[in-house]
Image (spheres, grey):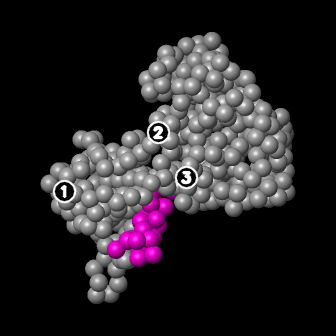
Amino acid sequence: MKDSYSPQSAGGLHPQEQLLGTPVSRNHLCIGLPKEESNGEKRFPLTPEGVAILVANGYRVRIESQAGNVINYSDYHYAEAGAEIVNTGEVYRCDLVLKTTPLSVQEAGFIRPGALLFTLLQPQYQSPEVLKILLQKRIIAIAYDLISNESHHYPFADMLAEVEGRASVVVASELMSNRSGGKGILLGGISGVAPSEVVIIGAGLAGRAAAHSALAQGALVRLFDNDVYRLRLARQEIDYSLFTSNLHPHVLKNALHSADVVISTEVMPGGKLTEENVKEMKKGALLFDLCMDRGGCSETSLCSDRPCDRVYEKHGVLHYCLSSVGSTVARTAAMAMSNLFVSLFLEFGEQGGVQGRIESCEGFRRAVYLYGGRVVNHDLSVRCGFPYYDMSLFVSMF
């Protein structure tokens, strides 16, 4: 077709006006958007604008009533965009169920056999009981945070990391105020008053985003990582005056001792921050743990077996432990996720659907964690006690 639209890979984004104005081949896939029932999880995968684009391109979208309330969009907004407002049972009978967190036992009971399931992997929150149900129903499950593109980037994981890094500084600034029970200090200080000291562990995308935001507020930032190339990239992207250092125990100990805020985006290669490290921090300092989905960055970080949402004090240090700090800016996260999902789903129409994408795209295939009634993700199989099957065995059958 002369006017057919060839969408960009999932690594790129298109203006929504451009997507709406350019038709593609029609799809008949029905997408279900259930509520997020996990405590503290408010990120929602599609906005009404994203729904409108998908509906205009032949998809059917069903959303559970009031599911969009977490990002301040009502049923009316989604209905106006072309979505069908349905109950819990109906939303799980769709061809593809799109959700942020892994399913509960009840939700797994609702989903129809042979359906497609898109979630974050989050192996620490996956239930063996739920996996057994999904395997019996031969669900094809894809962890969208593991999807990579041709440039070997992870669009969804990178986007979520950037949101979390930037949001962590916003939340940290609020927690340090008197209103939130903090020390009552500004991160950036003022004329004649020294700025706060912020230590960031991990110079990945989340760490660099946090450093950028903290510096923009005027804080004194120290960034630690053992990868000198990532530290060099941080200085190039942010500011050559940024203090960077390897995770040298003595240098890190001194930085922790004087820090007002510690933001850990990664678990250190040598292990977690020890309880002694925390005891030596300033009274009233803040430890912001972005590693709760990996067991926490510190021996003093507490996490349950479900997504965490905890703020507490230990050894005089305020601990903020949240599985997804992106949930504090849920609408921004939802808009970013929606852009990526729209680009991804529009590609399905040109690649023979999800199955065609699995067959033709290695970066997408590696994100599959359940296929053909088997667990095909090694980490998940080890954690939940299921036999592991290499996805390449299925590829040879395509």
Give SS at disc 2.
loop
What residue is disc 3 on? 40
- Mark 3: give few (<14), some (14-19) or many (20+) Cα within 10 Å: some
Give SS at disc 1.
helix
Circle nearer the N terminus (3, 2): 3
Circle nearer the N terminus (2, 1): 1
- Res. 253 mark: 1
Q: Is residue 205 above or below residue 25?
A: below
Determine whether label 2 and label 1 are within 8 Å by CB.
Answer: no
Please report the bounds of the magenta region as a residue range: 161-183
Q: Which residue lies at the image location 50% right of the left edge and 19% below the top edge?
A: 386
The span from disc 3 to disc 2 (Cα, nearest Å) is 13 Å
Nearest the eye: 201 or 129: 129
Q: Which residue lies at the image location 28% right of the left edge and 54% below the top edge?
A: 224
Circle nearer the N terminus (1, 3): 3
Give SS at disc 3.
loop
- Mark 2: give few (<14), some (14-19) or many (20+) Cα within 10 Å: few
Q: Which residue lies at the image location 38% right of the left edge and 41% below the top edge?
A: 295
Q: Which residue lies at the image location 62% right of the left edge and 17% below the top edge?
A: 373
The span from disc 1 to disc 3 (Cα, nearest Å) is 32 Å
